[in-house]
Image (cartoon, rainbow, N blue to C red):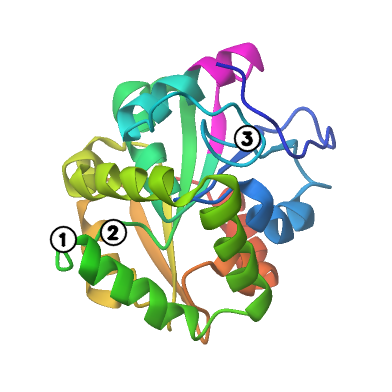
Amino acid sequence: MRLHERYRDDARAGATPLVFVHGLGVSSRYLMPTAARLAGERRVYLPDLPGFGRSAKPPRPLDVGEHVEVLAAWLDAARLERAVLVGNSMGCQVIAELAARRPERVERAVLVGPTMDPAAPSLLRQTARLLATGLFEPPGLNLIVAAEYLLVAGPLRTLATARAALAHRLEERLPLLGAPTLVVRGSRDLIAPQAWAERVTRLLPHGRLAVVPGAAHAVNYNSPDDLARLVRAFLAATG
């Protein structure tokens, strides 16, 4: 299945490229603020997963594992043998699953606001967290999310994908993510609270945690300068 690729920059073609993976119900559009700040340093790719953004919409919504298989095929088509994967929300689940199945494809990973926290094991509780966190997000992001949930992906596909993401056990995949991994959360992120972010980091073989003060769930949109700085430092670090 062909994925729509929103953005690419061939600067510093010798460095391992960055591949951004978006979250539930949205497209890669809201990842652009951070991606644009890093595009002059590495090749940057922002594919839209199947059913979202400008990518084709399969007859039924895909689960996390199926998204991974499509993403892996896209990496093959793009001739990206290895990449630094940067994901937000459900995108973190896709990255962790990819690393578990195809560890050779992931050089490093950045997990921003990873889901799903098992302390909120129902769609109702996750939705309550989403709405509460939205109060701390920029109005522009909330407009993007609402438009893509309702008009692009559609509410039925978004709901079905949310159920699939809730069924996926991120905590079982994290110990298999052997690449160095940076976990990032905003201090006002109620979807990925501090206790969960710390647990995610502990489960990773080579994990480290960074908290962005005052930021909410989509650090990539609400605090792109901070996230770009963290990513640069993480990529520059050895070990």
Tell me which amino acid carries mark 3: Pro
Q: Nearer the viewer, residue 179 or 165?
A: 165
Residue 118: which disc?
1
In the picture provided, is 110 more to the left or to the right than 81? left
Going from N to C along the chain, the mark reached first, 3 or 2, is 3
Instruction: Give the secondary structure at mark 1.
Output: loop
Q: Which residue is mark 3?
A: 47
Q: Which residue appears at 50% of the width and 48% of the height? A: 154
Tell me which amino acid carries mark 2: Thr
Q: Are marks 1 and 2 in contact (CB under 8 Å)?
A: no
Going from N to C along the chain, the mark reached first, 1 or 2, is 1
Residue 201: which disc?
2
Find the distance from the CA under tag 3 to the CA under tag 2.
26 Å
In the picture provided, is 32 more to the left or to the right than 218? right
Q: Tell me, yes or no, if residue 223 can be seen here.
A: no
For the record, the magenta segment spans 73-84
Q: Residues within 10 Å of mark 1 (few under 14, many from 20)?
A: some
Q: Which residue appears at 17% of the width and 62% of the height? A: 122
Tell me which amino acid carries mark 1: Pro
